[in-house]
Amino acid sequence: MNAPLQAQTVFEAIEAVLDLHWLGGISGAERILWSSVEASAPLYGRLNWIQAARLQILGPDEGAFLNRLTPAARAELIGCLFNFPTGAILVCGEPRLAEALRPEADAVSVPLWYSPAALAVVMDRLDSYRHGLEASTVVHGELLEVFGMGLLLTGGSGIGKSELALELVSRGHRLVADDTPTLIRVAPDILEGACPSTLSDLLEVRGLGILNIRRMFGDSAIKRNKRVRLIIHLVKIEEIAPPAESRLQGMRDTRVILGVSVPAITLPIAPGRNLAVLVECAVRDHILRLGGYCAEQDLTARVEKAMARAAPCT
């Protein structure tokens, strides 16, 4: 999203799914709810006095709280809510509260919306809408959950990504998306992947055609979305010249997608190599590295220690 997000834009986007009604403050349609520089900021808040430009949500809990106050205290609190530079107010499941707020909303031109939907539904829809505003891209590859970690398999067409994904699923791991996962930056340093709805549960394998993974392996074989924590790029061994240090360190680098840096490993493939086992080991090793352990550093320390013991005393 490049332009600031106005109240009118948000209302039109969620009006149908939440049965939204614009009760007051019509003249405040151009109020800014979310600016383009706030890449990781939430779209809404509940009586949020810190991020005033947000969409403020009032649900049953807020309604009950206001009802417990004396009329004078309630009027003062409502006055503060509207006089503060609030972007808009959405009341869910409390029609009487919404009607009571209408005169104040009209007076100060703060958009006042009402939805009969439950608070949890409202927040879920707003989260989905907010995530959809983020930068997104479609990549060519397989997105899986391996040992609880989001793994993106990439490589040239026909190199065997789908077959490898199928073998990983048969070993108990989970498929997120085949061939065209959609990646969304949901925070400055978080990249989340999901499957387009038309392709969900499906995996295309040469020679077998389209397979329904959910029906073949059960619900546990499918993951709706997953944060991408590691990329493994498959390449034919004859097409690369691995540097000498790769024997100890592997071929590791970083790939930047939508401004997010993701650790990447280049994995040479050749006849006879068990790719599923290699991928599992790569993920296990990456988990160890995240925990602070690095095998080549361990080896270097052992060699240095052995050389120190073997050195003659002077």
Image (spheres, rainbow, N blue to C red):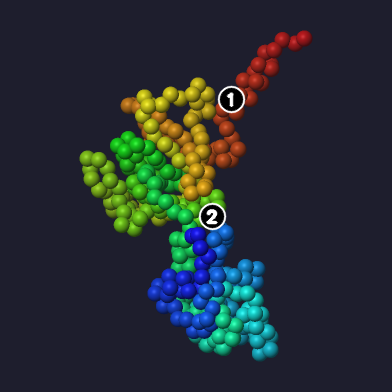
Q: Quadrant of the C terminus?
A: top right
> Residue drawn 54% across and 55% down?
187
Q: Is residue 242 above or below residue 41?
A: above
Q: Position of residue 131 (x, y in %)?
A: 47, 60
Which mark identifies residue 43?
none
Report which residue position mark 1 lands on: 299
Instruction: Report x, y in % for residue 55.
Output: 55, 72
Nearer mark to the viewer, of 2 and 1 = 2
Q: Mark 1 or mark 2, which is nearer the start of the sequence?
A: 2
Given the image, on which type of amino acid does mark 1 rest? Leu
Disc 2 packing (10 Å; few <14; some 14–19; many ≥20):
some
Residue 18 vs residue 15, the one in the foreground: 15
Q: Amino acid at mark 2?
A: Ala
Q: Is residue 273 visible?
A: no
Instruction: Please tell me in which quadrant of the rendered image residue 151 appears.
Output: top left
Q: Is residue 242 visible?
A: yes
Mark 2 — residue?
A: 187
Above/below status of 250 relative to 307: below
